[in-house]
Image (tube, helix red, strand yellow):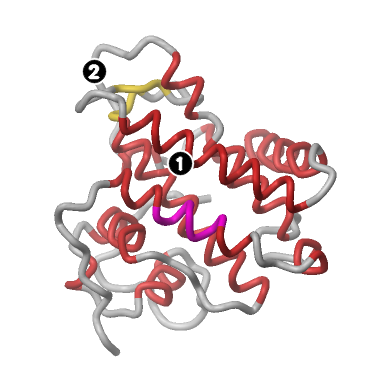
Amino acid sequence: MSAARPVDPDRTVLDAFRDEADALGHAAARWADSDWARPTRCAPWPVRELFAHVHVVLAWLPGMLAAPAPAAPDTSAAGYYRPDHRFAPETDAARIRLAREHAASFATPGRQVREFRTLTAELTGRCAAEPAGRVVRTRHGDAMLLDDFLTTRVVELAVHGLDLADALGRPAWLTPAAAGVVLRLLFERPADELPGPADRLLRRATGREPGGPAPAGLRPLTLG
């Protein structure tokens, strides 16, 4: 098994966010109408509602950027994935409801994809204009470096991108930059030091590929 592809060290987490969001938007624009109703492993969401969930979790960012910046961060990207109220049953129920409401607000999947691509382009521009070291407050109350919060959004894009690709029986579109960000978070090592391919390693690390033990060196995070 070959190693995961190396990532350009000069690429940033914002580059990874842009690349993975672009890849998902491009893939979704080619799905047939029947594809949007297919079930996913993220029950009870079909493809359309899982895609909506990804939109919803990215759409928290504009309000966070508009709010006053906390004085200092108190939560890292890894610390964000601690087993607390954010994974409680009532929080999960709210996630399900918000995704369903968002999907239902669009007359067609095509409009939903266009809104997603508009949002991610705007977020890329807004985040690029923020100063280094910018701190934001999450909806859960965490004060985080913007780069660390963007890391969690790359996780959402990459992991749910695999869920969508698998539901549709399509090859994964996981980008090297996003794979590098997520695998470093999970293993605290560069992607090119890990056995690949990256999409299979990420499936195993997040319990999406059954069989065998978890990959060696996996950091225990609560990913929902």
Say which mark, if any, is on residue 72.
2
52, above or below 176, in the image: above
Q: Which residues are magenta?
A: 19-25
Report the side of 19 relative to 72 (left or right).
Answer: right
Q: Is residue 75 magenta?
A: no
- Quarter where residue 128 is shown: top left
- At a point 72% along the width and 51% down the height, the residue shown is 49
Q: Secondary structure at mark 1?
A: loop
Q: How many discs appear?
A: 2
Magenta segment, prevailing SS (helix, strand or loop): helix
Residue 55 lies, in percent from the top left, at 60, 42
Q: Nearer the viewer, residue 136 or 222?
A: 136
Say which mark, if any, is on residue 83.
1
Quick check: marks 2 and 1 in contact, CB under 8 Å? no
> Which mark sits nearer the N-terminus, 2 or 1?
2
- At a point 36% along the width and 31% down the height, the residue shown is 127
Say which mark, if any, is on residue 123.
none
- At a point 63% along the width and 60% down the height, the residue shown is 28
- Quarter where residue 147 is shown: top left
